[in-house]
Amino acid sequence: MYISYNWLNDFIKLPKSYSPEKLAEDLTLHTVEVEGIFDLSKKYDSVLVGEVLEVKKHPQADKLNLALVNIGQKEPLKIVCGASNLEAKQKVAVATIGSKLPNGLEILEAKIRGEISQGMICAEDELGLGSDHQGIMVLDNKAKPGMSLAKHLSLDDVVIEIDNKSLSNRPDLWGHYGIARELGVILDTDLLPYDKLLNISNNKNRQEISEKAGDNKGISVKIEDENLCPYYSAVKIKNIKIGESPDWIKQRLLAAGLNPINNIVDITNYVMLELGQPLHAFDASLINDIVIKPLKQADKFLALDNKEYELSKGDLVISSNKKTLAIAGVIGGKDSGIKEDTQEIILESANFDAVYVRKTSQRLGLRTEASSRFEKSLDPVLCNLARQRAINLILEQNSEALVEGGVISSGNNKLEEINIELSLAWLKKAIGQEVEDEYIKTVLSRLGFIVETKEDKDSLKLQVPSWRATKDVSLAEDILEEISRIYGYNKIVKDLPFTKISVPVFSDNYSVEKELKDSLAKDAGFSEVHSHVFVNSRQLNKLGISHSHYLSVKNPFSEHLSLLRQSLAPNILEAIKINQARYAVIKLFELGSVYLSFSGKFHTDNRQEKYLPHQEKRLILALASLQSDFELLSELKGSLENLILRLFGFNPEIIYEKVEISSSWAEPSLSANVIIENKSLGSINKLKEEVAKNLGIKKSVVLLEINFSAFWELLNLMPAKKYKALPKFPGLVRDLAFVLDNSVAYKEVKKELENFHEYIRSVELFDVYQGDKLGSDKKSLGFHLVYRHAERTLTAQEVDEIQSSLIKHLEDLYQAKIRNF
Amino acid sequence: MKNKLEQLRQEALKQLEDLKESKSLKNQKEIWRALEIKYLGRKGQLSQILRQIKDLSTSEKKEVGAFANKVKTEIAEAFSEFENKFLSSKAGQSQVDMSLPGKRSSLGHLHPITLMQRELEELFKSLGFSILEGPELESDYYNFQALNIPEHHPARDMQDTFYVNWEDQEDENKLVLRTHTSPVQVRAMQEFGAPLKAIVPGKVFRNEALDASHEHTFYQLEGIMIDKNISISNMIAVMKELLKGIFKEEVEIRIRPGFFPFVEPGIEIDMKCRLCQGQGCPVCKQSGWLEVFPGGMIHPNVLEAGGIDSKKYSGFAFGLGLTRLAMMKHGIADIRLFNSGDLRFLEQF
């Protein structure tokens, strides 16, 4: 919102030394955030008033003239000009060399068809003062050559831009009067009462206006639903002549960012900018019975902005003779709008329900000056003030104008009184420092509260002013804010709190997460990525994943964000693709949530009946390079095993179990579930080559995705470590390597070895070999076996005997062939 | 035996001398190795002789032993000298280029957000704050209503929201991707009650288009402190102390009112722009100040939603933009890099 510095001076006396910068700072520190300050006098920096001394035809061009223009300097300027309305003795706006116009045009000295031009004579639109480009702008004859245009137009104002977001809880600040009230409090200065403003008008055309309910002389007002429209008033004014507004109104509208339209619409806007209450003016010719009602059926509506809107059943409209005149609180209709030949108008001043206005304007995608005020819950008391102010201004400017029949209204424009009991002791304790009672009372009175000191002197009874009572202020805490912001947060003495010490709680996985990330990055060389939680159907299709059971976003602004991920794989594959051209080996990990379409552990609300969808944290490791499947898989498994060793402190048995049905994108023979302590934690998979091709990935990719919660739960289940007595007798180590069919799984063989004899205490794989020497369907596995007896030293002979029968057993079982080193 | 040793010594040195004349380096190496084994190896000639020492008388043992050691050392030195001089690549040039860098193992990198988050977590841990988490996919109730933001409240405009389809479409149960970490305030109050000191770092979402300064997914860190007699003065002191902890020095701040429905009163702490020293630049929108730290006294409605008696307890809440802090700290101008997965970016941290 734009606030004019001069306008504020109508309501409070700002000290002469009070600069716009200081005002902006004060508002920011005590009330609302100021986003910018614009000095209008600097808008037309080097544009001066000029007097045309002489106009001649350009010798080389029919349509151009040569003008000699006096700008108050010794030598007049020579200017080439194409405007047909240029005449000698005119006063014009001259953009001199070096000036920059609001439309971005920079004026340079130029030669036009051989003639020097030392500036430009401007048209209205070039100066951003209107849309007229018919010819140059001709100024008032009293204008003084050489004077700056801004000064001549009285553009000696400064505009202060306020961040609308910081106003969303303050319906009272959507007009200059409200801002002036705040400044009055901050500066401890009196504010002109608004009803006084209504009376000081030196208008000769003053008329007594009565207010009646129901109908009168041809117009009637009926509200069908007082919840949606608590109050509506209309007044008919005759003998109107539509024309331009006087300059002072136009200037203020422009300063506040609105374009002048005509003398009636401008006044409705002027009052809105002053008081915050939107008004609307209809052409009265089509209107007699005004009904405010929800629409019975959907309809089309041509609005003032020349756009057609689709209204829905239930939308609140202003109608007459069954014709929709306006969307209540949002926008008026084209047909019932003020036209050049309008002679009778109906002025609307009403209050509409905030939620309703907001819903309608959101659905129509139509944000207007009116709707953005109504949706903040406006004070209904404003309706009368605003209406009276507008009538005064209209009558003042139309000496013939006549109010016909007084104000017709319906509904209630009184608010229920809100009273707050405020303990001063509580207030000071809540601020954390001493503030004087008198100060508190003064601030509250200036803000408009009716302050009554209770007998005990410690508490105040406060009546909230109507402009703060719609939603904004109702609790003692709200008063706490009023006092502390006006007092100034920067003045509050800082005081660190005393608290009882207690052992903090950490989310279950807090420390595990830290250790895990460190291990993956610092030990295993994986880099951490963050990817979006969104996936889309095209992406999933390429992976062969059906998304029928995926949670979807209701209102994504892009199709890319339409689904919520159920695996970290799709997006980490994107990351592989992004990096593949620059890195031979890519190692990435991500820890993030997936969102599944069944109920999880979090309640949706206090009733604790329903649950949010299940959300679990997953960890994914991705490894991409041109290495062989065997190398990739063993590196990835190794990274996992090292991670587990680091987190668990020992290596629990990890089983890679072949999956029955693998993921659609995974190579079935190269997919396995990862199982620890009979718990499946996730799976390890190689990306199918054809899928990689579809995705545009040119490397081999293996992925390991595990359920992080299951992982740390398992970690939590691990019993505290128990000390085991050191072996009293030495063990004997024997190495054993043999060639097997590829189809025989390592974990089978290992189990055979471990269970073969009680003296075999540990079995450890130390070598895997596949190669031409063995034949393509063979592999060799090498193990260290440790033989030990708890109560005596085993002899070499004993061990050799067990080992030979073990070899025999394996030969029989797997047709294994012992390899010699 | 001494003779034998002496003979062996001469023979070995002679053979080494002869080897110097040999032209082929490859050959030289092989012969040298064979000689070394022949004389100095475990089953070499010297060892064989030395093994016999144990059969000598004590006095002889001492004398022969000392001599044998001398011979052994001499031969070993000769062999090693020969190796250094003639066998290492090229004599005289065998030194290592000490200016070469070492051999590194390739480390991975932690995400800059993780690093920023850890830094703050350490700070808050040291002040006795708990570290909590909550669901990213939230209900409308916890994300808005419990935080004093009813449906159709204009404050909802401040946060463009991703709504998510779910079987249950009732108002309170409508699903949203949380627009802030604040819903965890209420969940934490319900779980732990008062007094409470906690932070909640996490991912939040806003439904808006991506550009260099806007991301629909970013990180926040929420903090709350609830106890008896917590005042505005306490809040400002703690927030200021935290800023000192984050920026490792006193920072110049200003405090102004800010509107957030879940606090009353609400404040914004601005920090003097470090880029322009408060002179005004594009980063601070010419104001000289950067909005870094919103907060406020927790609204009594929010305390009540969390099951805490607002007559007995008060508290404050604040939020920090983790992503923004990381951008400020490292001078990252494009917010999209964080979720890009681009290793050229990630490897810098």
Image: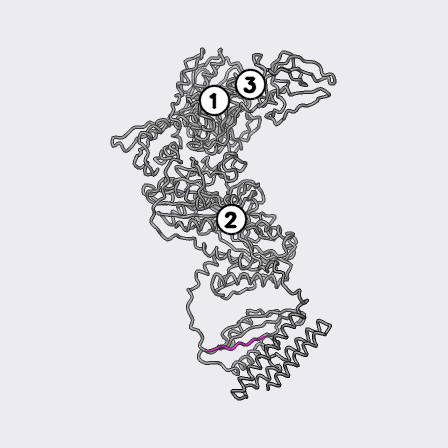
Q: Residue furthest left?
A: A455
- Label 1 vs 3, first from the N-terminus: 1
Q: Residue furthest right?
A: A60
Q: Which residues are magenta?
A: A729-736
Q: CA distance from mark 1 to mark 2?
A: 48 Å
Tell which subunit mark 1 falls on: A
Residues marked 1 and 3 touching at CB (< 8 Å): no
| Residue receiving disc 2 | B113
The amino acid at mark 1 is Asn
Mark 2 or mark 3, whichever is nearer to me: 2
Mark 1 or mark 3, whichever is nearer to me: 1
The amino acid at mark 2 is Ile
Q: Based on the displayed image, in which of its 4 quarters is residue A638 positioned?
A: bottom right
Dot 3 surroundings within 10 Å: few (below 14), some, or many (20 or more)?
Answer: some
Q: Is residue A817 visible?
A: no
Give residue A24's position: percent from left, percent from top.
46, 29
| Residue receiving disc 1 | A6
Q: Residue at x 52, y 32 (%)?
A: A312
Classify B228 as above or below A758: above
In this orientation, which residue lies closer to the viewer: A257 or A354?
Answer: A257
Q: Are marks 1 and 3 on the same chain?
A: yes
Dot 1 surroundings within 10 Å: few (below 14), some, or many (20 or more)?
Answer: some
Give residue A414's position: percent from left, percent from top.
37, 25
Helix, strand or loop at disc 3? loop
Tell which subunit mark 3 falls on: A
Helix, strand or loop at disc 2? helix
| Residue receiving disc 3 | A339
In this orientation, which residue lies closer to the viewer: B244 or A60?
Answer: B244
Classify A313 as above or below A636: above
In this rendering, position of residue A724 left or right of residue A573: left
The amino acid at mark 3 is Lys
